[in-house]
């Protein structure tokens, strides 16, 4: 019989429909173009720097450089630049407008691309430990750079990997949007967190560290399939230490994050056949009550009319079953 599960601390629900369960191999058919070698005319490849906007930060051999109109930095490790088709503009516009009670304001903000390798076809799970640690430090650096900008209230940092996950360019990269508002899901969480004596994420850590949903852990982080999950094989990464955003993390914490993130992505590849996926950082720079977390979701199911109508989700693979598959793969890989 199916179950209706409540979120850990929000009034949100999902349906776990185990009778409709599939084996992991049944999802492999959705694996799409992620990692295919189509480097011809790729804007993100090393050597194509003139085809993008001037880089806002170029990371090379542990140092940070800037492009100039006269010279683009070459032979880089990571390269950050404004999105060619930005959702927001860094130019402050005119005052808000109202029309018959409707409200709009200028689309102020920042939209940046973080290219994670000059080489086409690389995958994050194939990075060395030092490479992925360096990338997580870039994430921290770019988050901090935008969190202090005028009128910025939230920094959205995420990866779309594969067309089915929303990637328009098949070259390893993430995106960052700095927003002048706090997104409603984060606001809802924060409103509840402020009414609870103990951080609910710290409570979740204590619960899931010893649960059948635990996949992996190291000295600083745990990886688990959440009890309330929005899709098959959703995974949360949660730090043991209470920190509210990447800027609060020391290098040790970031190195441990890179280690466990790489392990989960490798396991996704082995168990699900390299599916398209998203991962998203949930963080708040000005709210110490919040607890940083990273959520991964392979795009192996479709949100249809029910999900759009209700805001609830039907998950055909229980978190416990998904964790067992991923945990078994990690154990065999040791």
Image (spheres, grey):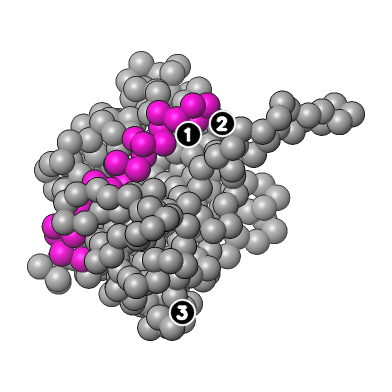
- The kind of secondary structure the magenta stretch mainly shows is helix
- Camera-side mark, 3 or 1: 3
Label 1 vs 2, first from the N-terminus: 1
Q: Would you say residue 242 sits in the magenta stretch? A: no
Instruction: Tell whether label 3 touches label 2 (CB within 8 Å).
Output: no
Secondary structure under the numbered disc 1 in the rendered image: strand
- Residue placed under numbered mark 1 in the picture: 154
**Where does the C terminus fall, quadrant-wise?**
bottom left
Answer left or right for 9 relative to 255.
Answer: right
Instruction: Tell whether label 2 touches label 1 (CB within 8 Å).
Output: yes
- Asked which quadrant contains residue 48, the reply is bottom left
Q: Would you say residue 151 sits in the magenta stretch? A: yes
Answer left or right for 310 relative to 290.
Answer: right
- Asked which quadrant contains residue 250, the reply is top left
Secondary structure under the numbered disc 3 in the rendered image: loop
Separation of marks 2 and 3 at Cα, in angstroms: 36 Å
- Residue placed under numbered mark 3 in the picture: 41
Residue 181, numbered label:
2
Label 3 vs 1, first from the N-terminus: 3
Secondary structure under the numbered disc 2 in the rendered image: loop
- The front one of 45 and 13 is 45
Read off the magenta span.
Answer: 127-153
**Residue 142 visible in the picture:** yes
Separation of marks 3 and 1 at Cα, in angstroms: 34 Å
């Amino acid at each position: 019989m199916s179950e209706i599960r409540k979120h850990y601390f929000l009034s949100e629900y999902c349906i776990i429909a185990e009778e409709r369960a599939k084996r992991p191999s049944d999802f492999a058919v959705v694996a799409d173009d992620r990692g295919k070698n189509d480097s011809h005319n790729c804007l993100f490849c090393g050597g194509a720097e003139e085809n993008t906007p001037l880089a806002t930060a170029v990371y090379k051999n542990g140092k940070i450089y800037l492009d100039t109109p006269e010279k683009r930095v070459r032979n880089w490790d990571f390269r950050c630049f404004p999105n060619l088709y930005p959702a927001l503009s860094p130019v402050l516009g005119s005052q808000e407008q109202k029309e018959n009670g409707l409200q709009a304001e200028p689309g102020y903000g920042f939209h940046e691309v973080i290219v994670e390798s000059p080489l086409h076809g690389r995958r994050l799970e194939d990075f060395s430990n030092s490479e992925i640690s360096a990338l997580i430090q870039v994430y921290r650096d770019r988050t901090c750079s935008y969190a202090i900008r005028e009128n910025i209230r939230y920094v959205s940092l995420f990866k779309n990997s594969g067309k089915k996950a929303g990637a328009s360019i098949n070259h390893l990269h993430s995106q960052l949007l700095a927003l002048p508002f706090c997104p409603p899901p984060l606001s809802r969480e924060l409103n509840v967190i402020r009414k609870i004596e103990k951080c609910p994420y710290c409570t979740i850590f204590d619960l899931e560290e010893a649960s059948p949903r635990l996949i992996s852990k190291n000295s600083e982080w745990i990886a688990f399939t959440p009890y309330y999950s929005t899709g098959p094989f959703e995974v949360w990464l949660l730090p043991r230490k209470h920190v509210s955003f990447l800027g609060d993390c020391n290098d040790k914490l970031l190195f441990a994050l890179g280690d466990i993130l790489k392990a989960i992505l490798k396991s996704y590849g082995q168990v699900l056949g390299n599916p398209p996926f998203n991962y998203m950082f949930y963080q708040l720079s000005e709210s110490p009550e919040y607890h940083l977390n990273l959520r991964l979701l392979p795009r192996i199911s479709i949100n249809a009319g029910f999900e759009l109508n209700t805001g609830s989700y039907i998950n055909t693979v229980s978190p416990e079953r998904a964790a067992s598959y991923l945990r078994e793969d990690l154990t065999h890989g040791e």
